[in-house]
Image (spheres, coloured by chain):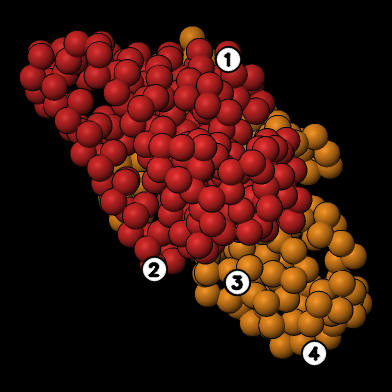
Chain colours: A red, B orange
Amino acid sequence: MAPPVAARRIPDSAPRPARGGKGEITRAQILSAAVEQASAHGFESLTIGSLAERTGLSKSGLFAHFGSKAELQMAVLEDAARQFTDEVFLPALKAPRGLKRLRALFESWIEWPARANLPGGCPIHVASREYRHTPGPMHDAVMEREKLLARELRKAVNLAIEAGELAPRTDPDQFAFEMVGLVLVVFQGEMIAGTEEAHRRGRVAFERLVKNHSA
Amino acid sequence: MAPPVAARRIPDSAPRPARGGKGEITRAQILSAAVEQASAHGFESLTIGSLAERTGLSKSGLFAHFGSKAELQMAVLEDAARQFTDEVFLPALKAPRGLKRLRALFESWIEWPARANLPGGCPIHVASREYRHTPGPMHDAVMEREKLLARELRKAVNLAIEAGELAPRTDPDQFAFEMVGLVLVVFQGEMIAGTEEAHRRGRVAFERLVKNHSA
């Protein structure tokens, strides 16, 4: 299958992994291209063959990095989760606890896919859709990530309640649920309404959500 | 690629299409299995080969129904759209105009994937994610469907405004945008919270959305 989104060719200069050396750099580049592919076409589209086609690397070179399709898929999920932590979660933690941090989280989250060149939005959400009914290591890993995210979101909402910025009666899980819904529809809405308009609508809805739960 | 969700094998008795006859029935069964596969693994996973594996039909039998991968993908998108119209939109039109109809639409929408055995939620949303950045017939067809949906949703919200059940200042596109967000997060939330809890949270949020825009 030829991946329809623009391929990102990587020079096949260092096919053998070597910690900290050129091999590690190539591995990071391969993972970056693979995360993009998973975002648009799902983790089941990730085969050594399709990734070879996408990156321009040899299949044997890719096998040296990832021994199997299953290993490749897991590495891509882990890399997507690392990107989410580094580019969405950690920057938001710089904002003070409470509404400022929740808002920073929402902002960095809706801006992430465009900035990180993820055409189909958050790859963890894509994996969750693909593996929810399929027992196995990918199912377990996705569940783990989703639970971790739910826990961190609950914590961020609770901090806003403790800061007196959200009402004590606020249900943190319900707030987090609706916040995720807005993130999903912003990614979805970009296609029809355009990125700017989808982000504007997302912000209007987020502020309404906050207002509804204000102390 | 072996599709990881349970395959739906179809007896290979009538590989050649014949309008209204056994061929049509087989075509409908193939499309149904293909819509399921697209829901979980995307439209790019739909190849004559993967569908042969999934349904147990011969590749030549499938070629008799769909001449190419592109033709197959388009037929699956059209069938998913037909299912959405028949199972979500038309039943909701039986409810009286206004909030009752909006609520009926939301209810039949969130219940659709479980009822129709669509493991990854609405296939049109999946296609929208896959083809938004890929020019071609699938991109155009998905855009067309998304615009049609946006128009119908706007109409349903406008009817509730005209009925005096939503405030005249309500922005129909904003309301529809948030409603779609709730549908998306219900599908997403089923994995972690379970179907019942995800639906309950979706309803709480939907009623809050309605209350915020009540006349």
Q: Secondary structure at mark 3?
A: loop
Circles 2, 1 touching at the beta carbon (< 8 Å)? no
Tell me the element at label 2: loop
Is B126 located above or below residue B53 in the figure? above
Q: Position of residue A140 (x, y in %)?
A: 33, 59
* Amino acid type shown at disc 1: Glu
Q: CA distance from mark 2 to mark 4?
A: 32 Å
Q: Which residue is mark 3?
A: B2
Q: Which residue is mark 1?
A: A197
Q: Earlier in the sequence, mark 2 or mark 1?
A: 2
Q: Nearer the viewer, residue A52 or A78?
A: A52
Q: Label 2 crowding class (10 Å Cα cut-off): few <14, some 14-19, many 20+?
A: few
Residue in the image at 60% along x and 63% along y? B36
Q: Which residue is mark 4?
A: B13
Residue closer to the observer: B198 or A104: A104
A62 displayed left or right of A80: right
Residue B99 seen in render? no
CA separation in Å, label 1 and label 4: 51 Å
Q: Is residue B158 left or right of residue B63?
A: left
